[in-house]
Image (tube, rainbow, N blue to C red):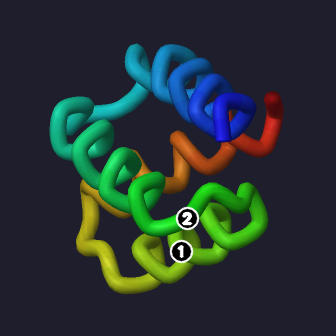
Amino acid sequence: MAELEKKIKDALFEARPYVEYFDKLKETINGLKEKTADEKEFKKLLEEKIAKAQEPFKTDLRIFLQKFEAL
């Protein structure tokens, strides 16, 4: 669990300068993190969230996912 948390924290830090709604992003990501400790499952939940999101928040989620996958 600690590894996923660190990766999420690092990805949020990396994404922060590029996202418009950082507080909403952080809240959403932490909500997803509460649902699973598995990285694959977390990514799946995030991708589902992206599919349902409206712009411009959808772009914020995509930026986070890009940073998350790069770590």
In the figure, is residue 43 to the left or right of 47? right
Whole-percent x, y for residue 54 in the image: 25, 73
**Which residue is at 78% across, 44% downward?**
69
Residue 24 location, quadrant: top left
Location of residue 44 with respect to 28 vertically, above or below: below
**Which residue is at 48% across, 27% downward?**
12
Report the Cα–Cα distance between label 2 and label 1: 9 Å
In the figure, is residue 70 to the left or right of 51? right
Q: Quadrant of the C terminus?
A: top right
The three-letter amino acid code for the residue at tag 2 is Thr
The three-letter amino acid code for the residue at tag 1 is Leu
Q: Earlier in the sequence, mark 2 or mark 1?
A: 2
In the figure, is residue 43 to the left or right of 24? right
- Disc number lying in front (2 or 1): 2
Whole-percent x, y for residue 50 in the image: 45, 71
* Towards the viewer: 2 or 41: 2
Residue 14 location, quadrant: top right
Badge 1 is on which residue?
45
Badge 2 is on which residue?
36
- Whether tag 2 and tag 1 are in contact, CB under 8 A, the answer is yes
Whole-percent x, y for residue 59 in the image: 41, 54
Under circle 1, the secondary element is: helix
